[in-house]
Amino acid sequence: MTDRGRVLGLGGVFIKSPDPDRLKAWYRDVLGFALDDYGVNFSLAGQDGYQLWSPFKADTDYFAPSTRDVMLNFRVDDLDALLVRILAAGGQMLGDVQEEPYGKFAWLVDPDGTKIELWQQTGDSG
């Protein structure tokens, strides 16, 4: 295996909820999450960056085409290299790579139908 194009770890957990605001309030009030508009960012010990927990409305289409209630986000070191390996293994990407000030993103669906978001962090670590 090459040295580049690896998953570094979990980037985030995204879950559907019938009432995301209520769920965020519960996590804030009961578990002490320091929430912002997206959810809560957990700092990575000894590293730049963060991991994200974020609830979405139950009717969101962001998880599509998956019908599952969870979407996984994985932090990667080199998105382009990983995409080459995924495509060579017969994987299919959903749409095009998207670039934001805080990173590059790509999406695919695993064999069980769970949508996977790949994220190479760039710019401000949040």
Image (spheres, helix red, strand yellow):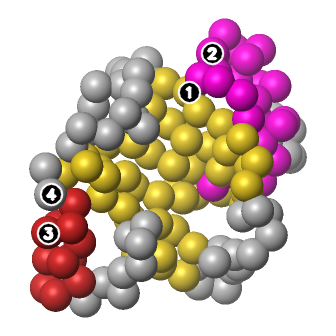
Q: Which mark is residue 22?
A: 3
Count up the numbered dots. Answer: 4
- Amino acid type at image mark 1: Leu
In this rendering, the label closer to the viewer, 2 or 4: 4
Distance, label 4 to label 1, CA atoms, is: 26 Å
Is residue 48 in view? yes
At 18% from the left and 78% from the top, the residue drawn is: 25
- Amino acid type at image mark 4: Asp
In this rendering, the label closer to the viewer, 3 or 2: 3
- Determine which residue is flagged by label 2: 92
Magenta segment includes 85: yes
- Residue 64 in picture, x, y percent from top left: 40, 27
Determine whether label 4 and label 3 are within 8 Å by CB. yes
Q: Nearer the viewer, residue 95 or 117?
A: 95
Relative side of 93 to 52, left or right: right
Q: Earlier in the sequence, mark 3 or mark 2?
A: 3
Q: Pointer 1: residues within 10 angstroms few (<14), some, or many (20+)?
A: many
Snapshot quadrant of residue 36: bottom left
* Magenta residues, start to end: 75-97
Determine whether label 3 and label 2 are within 8 Å by CB. no
In this rendering, the label closer to the viewer, 1 or 3: 3
- Determine which residue is flagged by label 1: 108
Determine whether label 2 and label 1 are within 8 Å by CB. yes
Distance, label 2 to label 1, CA atoms, is: 6 Å
SS category of the residue bearing label 4: loop
| Quadrant in which the C terminus is drawn | bottom right
Distance, label 1 to label 3, CA atoms, is: 30 Å
Distance, label 3 to label 2, CA atoms, is: 36 Å
Q: Earlier in the sequence, mark 2 or mark 1?
A: 2
Q: Pointer 2: residues within 10 angstroms few (<14), some, or many (20+)?
A: some
Q: Pointer 4: residues within 10 angstroms few (<14), some, or many (20+)?
A: few
- Residue 8 in picture, x, y percent from top left: 65, 56
